[in-house]
Amino acid sequence: MREAPPRIALVALDLDGTVVDGALRVTSPVIAAIERAREYGVTTTIVTGRMFRAARPFADRLGIEGPIICYQGAGIFEVSTGKILRYTPLASAIALKVVAFAKVRGLHVQLYADDAFYIEKSSRFSELYAYVSGVSPDVVPSLEERFADSDSSKAVIVTDADKAEGLCAELRAELGAEAYVTRSNPEFVEVLAAGVDKGVALRYVARLLEVDMAETLAVGDSWNDIPLLRAAAFGVAMGSAPPAAKAAADAVVGDVAHDGVSEAYDRYVRP
């Protein structure tokens, strides 16, 4: 385990299960901790799988105006202007491989473009995603036709949580080095362009902000946060994180119900 750096200049926070609870709330202790850190010069960014428009309300709530990381790192946006600073989409051919994989197995699949997500029909799985994201889907007759000549920000299969890890393994075997496959929420299997992950994106944002990676701290709670926790100088896992995420972290704090993010700031982010 690494020791916490004596100075933290940049904190990278996952959203769902870390900052945001299951009822889509952010508690006042977490907001206060971020505000205190800002007063003594510490920048906070968001690193999430959410679309930009699904992440922006939380950035506003937290007082974040600078760059944030969305789509697991495939999109980096300036909150104050909405400008896209970096975009690494999933090629159409790979996205449609995921669609075919899902359809053969009778699974719900969705693709993304222009900060919207597309499905062919509504289901309990699309309703779950819409609730979590706060965004309604665009329903199209055919994902193959909609994305025939258009890349996708990512592809997501939404399934029952007990099936997700097996599907991840199958997709990794099917796609190999063509894509990055991960899980975010327990029900979400996410496919991104090869070379995209939260850790790569954090390094990019640190360079934008002229922050040394030796002065970074990250907090996350899920499988997709493992690259983030490893990339930061000090990685903190939430108490609810799966064993693999805790193993990748340097410390563990309370879960979202016990304001683990506030605990991380209090313990490791100093004036």
Image (spheres, helix red, strand yellow):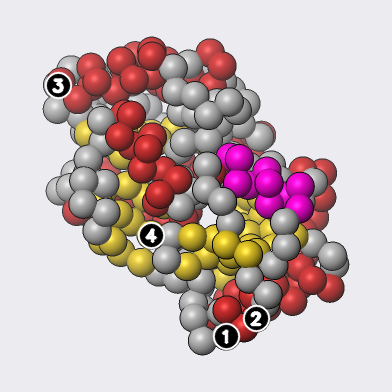
Relative to 133, say whether 243 is above or below. Answer: above
In front here: 243 or 44?
A: 44
Secondary structure of the residue carrying tag 4 is strand
Question: What segment is highlighted magenta in the picture?
Answer: 123-132
Where does residue 68 sit, x and y in percent of width and height? 32, 47
Q: Residue at x 29, y 23 (%)?
A: 34
Residue type at mark 4: give it: Gly
Residue ID for mark 1: 148
The stretch drawn in magenta includes residue 124: yes
Q: Secondary structure at mark 2?
A: helix
Q: Quadrant of residue 180?
A: bottom right
CB under 8 Å between discs 3 and 2: no
Mark 1 residue type: Ala
Q: So how many labels did they put on this image? A: 4
| Secondary-structure class at tag 3 | loop
Circle nearer the N terminus (3, 1): 3
Please tell me the numbered disc located at residue 40.
3
- Residue 243 lies, in percent from the top left, at 66, 34
Of discs 4 and 3, which sits in the foreground? 4
Mark closer to the observer (4, 1): 1
From where the camera sits, is residue 94 visible? no
Circle 3 packing at 10 Å, graded few (<14), some (14-19), many (20+), is: few
Residues at marks 1 and 2, CA–CA distance in whole angstroms:
5 Å
Residue at image coords 26%, 46%: 79
Q: Residue 144: which disc?
A: 2
* Mark closer to the chain start, 4 or 3: 3
Q: Which residue is mark 4?
A: 75
Question: Residue 204 versus residue 142: which sits nearer the camera?
Answer: 142
Vertical relation: 171 (above or below) 162? below
Q: Is residue 244 left or right of residue 165?
A: left
